[in-house]
Structure formats: C-alpha cells, structure tokens
C-alpha cells in the first residue's frame, strides 16, 4: 500500500515534468524559432556567413535596390545608388544594424511560424520589401555631399514617407574597400546611419527652439529690440557674435542669426523654461523609425549658469540634436503642430503576392508644438529665406528654414554646417535636414546649395 502511493506520486511527478517540459519547449520554439531558422549557420539563407537568399528590396519607383540571383545578393546596377542607399538597405555581412537586411531579416527570408523558411529553401525566394525612398533623390544627395561627411534626410510631412536618407562616408557594397582602408579616417563611422543613430551640436538651428520658448514666454518679444556690438558680455566672459548687427527686432535678430541677441534671450528665459521647451520639441526624446530607435539629443541645463545659458541659447554648450528629429520638428512646424512620424519601409509582400505589412500614418507625440507657436515659427523661418538667404537660393520652392554653423573641436577640423527647413508649397510638402561635418565654408555656403539641389531633384 505504502509502495503504491509512492509509485503513484512518482508517476504523477514524471507526467507533470513531461507536461512542463513540453510547454517550455513549445514556448521557446515559438519565441526563438525565428532566430534559430535565420541563424547565420543556416546554409539555406547564408553562404560564407553572408546573407545570400532573400526577397527583393525596391525603391518607391520599383527600382531594384537589392536582390538575389543564383544564390548571390546583388545591389542596384548604379554604383552611386548603391552608396547612397547602403545605410537604408544594409550590408550582407551584418555590420550595419540599421539596414533593412538586418532589421527585416526574417521578413526578407520569408520566415513564418508554420512553414519556417520553406519558400526560401524550396524556391530560393523570400518576401519583397518596398521602401519609400526615391533612389534618384538619394543619389543626388550623395553626389551633392561630394565626398564630405554628413547626412541628408527629406520626408513628406503630410504622409511621413522618407524619400531621401543618405549618410556619409558610405562605400560600394559590391566593391568594398579592404579592411585597412575601412579602418582609415576616410571611412570612420561608415557603418553608422548618422541620420537616425547620431546626435550633433545643433549650433544656430537651435535658435528655432530658443525662438519658440521666447514666443511662449516673453509676451512683448515682438516689440523688443536687441542691440549687438559683436559680442555679449556675461559676468566677465563673452559670447561672440558673427557680426556687429546693431539694433534689431526679434525677427531681424533671427534673420541675422545674431548670437548676442539669442544669448540675451536665453539668459532671460532661464534654464527651466529653456529645458522644458527643448524637451517639448522632442530634442531629448526618441521614437522608432521603422525598427530603429532615434539617437536622443541632449539639453540638460540643470547645472547651467548664465554664460552657459547664453551658449545654450545659440545651440552650443552641451546641446546636441539628432538630424532625423530636427527634420521631424521642421515637419511639425510646417504642419501647424501636427507631427507625422517618418518611415521608410512602405510594404512587405509574400512570394504569393499577399501583403503582410503596409505602413500607416502615425503621430509623433514626442513633439508637442501648439498651433500658434508653429504658425509664428513658420513666419520667422519664411522671413529668413525671403529677407536674408534670398528666394533665389531656393527657386520656386517657397522655402522656410534656418542654417547653423556649429563649432566642434578646434579651428582646423572646421565647423558642422546645418540647414533645416521645409517648403510651404501646397503640392510639395517636404521637410529637409542637411548636415555637413567639418565644413570649410559656412552653412549658408555649404548646406543651402545641397538642400536646394536635393529638393529640386524631387519628382524629376
Ligand atoms: Zn549679432
């Protein structure tokens, strides 16, 4: 009797352990099978550790950006397009974590929980991915950067479609430089998509944030005048201006990008209000662009004294900003505070033609800009182009925008040249960011021509 009870308990234990084991196995199969199946050792998908068999990646005009032929992965037939779209498409070796090859690996290989990678193993085909990028505009941007390091991004601020996303240095994936060359200064950070994954000192483009803070917190800002004699003295130290602008209104001070005026405004606003506005405008936040979390910018003024706030107000001090977030902020201003989140993966289609994913318009709640402030910023940024840069630098585009020449490192390395802006043309709802690192010329001379060339190539 005693033995029977013991055996019954033992049997119950064994059965229980079996059930538990099955559940755990099933659960872990469900969770990890995708990873197991697409593991780099799986020879159906990879040859020599490189992704080989996968679906085709298209740009917005159905031009092929990457495809598999006879078990080998090929890119666009145009080498400039290959370089211009490399950070969006991704390499085949897995160095570029933000490319579609890595991010949408299981979709490209056609994996699903029921048939595994059946289609790929049997027919050598995976799902196709259509991007929103226009490879021609990307190529124009890549060529306009002309060997300089930086990034260019353009998106439709009504729909969220990114049509241009270029990061340099890049390389030709079908003719990759050798390891030593890749490790040289010329190819430094070549695997990083700077548009999504880096943050930079914003320089004078940050005066847009300081302006928004002033509009919301200084009731008579439009009646004020600011006098610039080439520098602003703050408790024994100086913020140096780029010129002697004399007596100016708030609008004129932004046109002139006057450091004296904006340092003075930021000091008056103080660190709490300035930090709150920078946060509200999304600069310290991140959201995902497809599956890539944006690099967060920084605006931490907790320990700032007056002179620090002077520098912060003109986008120096410890302020940094992500290029994609700056572009999205421009979209928010253009859209009267309605912020559409940018994306570049439009749809995914199975070998049988079924759509498994279609991008939808999403709000970017990380940017909180009210209608009134957005409208006033539109007027100010339009005034910059009309009254300062000149309409002729953006022919026919009805552009609004702001340049920024951000000091980084010493004089020898040069400054970072920015342009951020948007078109107000009804049928041309595009916002843009251009960043050229270590530029030998000013943002006005370096970044504006790139922005114009890229925008003029849209739809062409
Ligand atoms: Zn000045």
Image (cartoon, rainbow, N blue to C red):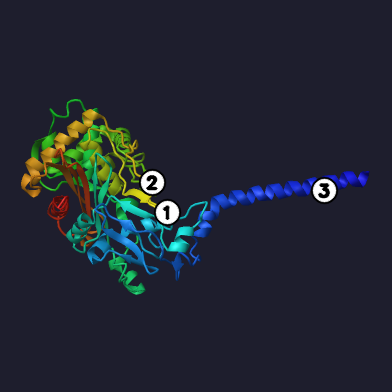
> Along the horizontal axis of the image, is 366 left or right of 316?
right
Whether disc 3's CB lies below 8 Å from ligand 1 is answered: no
Report the disc number at residue 357: 2
The span from disc 1 to disc 2 (Cα, nearest Å) is 10 Å
Please rate how many residues cluster around mark 2, counting C-alpha atoms within 10 Å: few if below 14, some from 14 to 19, many from 20. Answer: some
The residue sitting at the front extreme is 352
Q: Where is residue 27 in the image (x, y as percent from the top left)?
A: 60, 48
- Secondary structure under badge 2? strand
Residue 115, compared with residue 269, is above or below; it is below
Report the disc number at residue 107: 1
- Secondary structure under badge 1? helix
The reply to whether the C-beta atoms of the residues labelled 3 and 2 are less than 8 Å apart is no
Q: Position of residue 243 (x, y in %)?
A: 11, 47
Q: In which quarter of the image is residue 374?
A: top left
> Along the horizontal axis of the image, is 400 left or right of 160?
left
The reply to whether the C-beta atoms of the residues labelled 1 and 2 are less than 8 Å apart is yes
- Secondary structure under badge 3? helix
The answer to whether residue 189 shows anywhere in this view is no
Q: Earlier in the sequence, mark 3 or mark 1?
A: 3
Please rate how many residues cluster around mark 1, counting C-alpha atoms within 10 Å: few if below 14, some from 14 to 19, many from 20. Answer: many
Report the disc number at residue 10: 3
Q: Earlier in the sequence, mark 3 or mark 2?
A: 3
Q: Which residue is drawn at 36% across and 39% down?
A: 302
The span from disc 3 to disc 1 (Cα, nearest Å) is 46 Å
């Amino acid at each position: 009797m005693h033995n029977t009870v013991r055996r019954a308990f033992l049997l119950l234990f064994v059965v229980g352990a079996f059930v538990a084991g099955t559940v755990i196995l099933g659960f872990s199969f469900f969770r990890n099978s995708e990873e197991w199946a697409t593991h780099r050792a799986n020879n159906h998908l990879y040859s020599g550790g490189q992704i080989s068999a996968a679906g085709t990646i298209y740009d917005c005009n159905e031009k092929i950006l990457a495809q598999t032929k006879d078990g080998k992965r090929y890119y666009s037939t145009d080498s400039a397009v290959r370089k211009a779209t490399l950070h969006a498409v991704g390499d085949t070796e897995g160095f570029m974590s933000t490319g579609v090859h890595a991010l949408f690996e299981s979709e490209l290989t056609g994996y699903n929980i029921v048939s595994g990678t059946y289609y790929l193993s049997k027919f050598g085909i995976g799902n196709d991915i259509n991007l929103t990028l226009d490879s021609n505009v990307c190529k124009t941007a890549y060529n306009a950067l002309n060997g300089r390091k930086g990034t260019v991004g353009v998106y439709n601020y009504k729909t969220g479609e990114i049509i241009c996303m270029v990061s340099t240095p890049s390389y030709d994936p079908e003719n990759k430089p050798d390891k030593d060359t890749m490790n040289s200064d010329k190819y430094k950070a070549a695997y990083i998509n700077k548009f999504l994954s880096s943050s930079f000192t914003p320089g004078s483009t940050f005066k847009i944030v300081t302006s928004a803070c002033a509009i919301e917190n200084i009731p008579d800002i439009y009646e004020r005048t600011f006098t610039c004699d080439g520098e602003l003295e703050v408790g024994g130290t100086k913020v140096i201006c780029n010129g002697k602008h004399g007596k100016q209104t708030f609008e004129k001070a932004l046109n002139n990008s006057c450091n004296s005026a904006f340092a003075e405004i930021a000091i008056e606003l103080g660190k709490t209000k300035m930090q709150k506005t920078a946060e509200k405008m999304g600069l310290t936040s991140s959201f995902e662009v497809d599956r890539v979390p944006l690099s967060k910018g920084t605006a931490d003024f907790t320990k700032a004294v007056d002179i620090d706030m002077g520098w912060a107000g003109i986008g120096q001090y410890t302020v940094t900003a992500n290029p994609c977030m700056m572009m999205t902020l421009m979209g928010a201003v253009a859209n009267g505070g309605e912020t559409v989140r940018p994306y570049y993966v439009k749809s995914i289609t199975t070998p049988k033609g079924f759509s498994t994913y279609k991008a939808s318009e999403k709000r970017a709640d990380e940017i909180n800009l009210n209608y009134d402030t957005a409208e006033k910023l539109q007027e100010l940024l339009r005034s910059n182009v009309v009254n300062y840069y000149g309409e002729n630098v953006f022919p026919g585009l009805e552009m609004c925008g702001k340049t920024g020449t951000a000091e980084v490192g010493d004089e020898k390395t040069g400054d970072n040249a920015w342009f951020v802006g948007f078109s107000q043309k009804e049928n041309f709802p595009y916002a843009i960011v251009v960043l050229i690192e270590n530029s030998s010329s000013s943002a006005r001379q370096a970044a504006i021509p790139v922005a114009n060339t890229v925008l003029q190539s849209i739809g062409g």
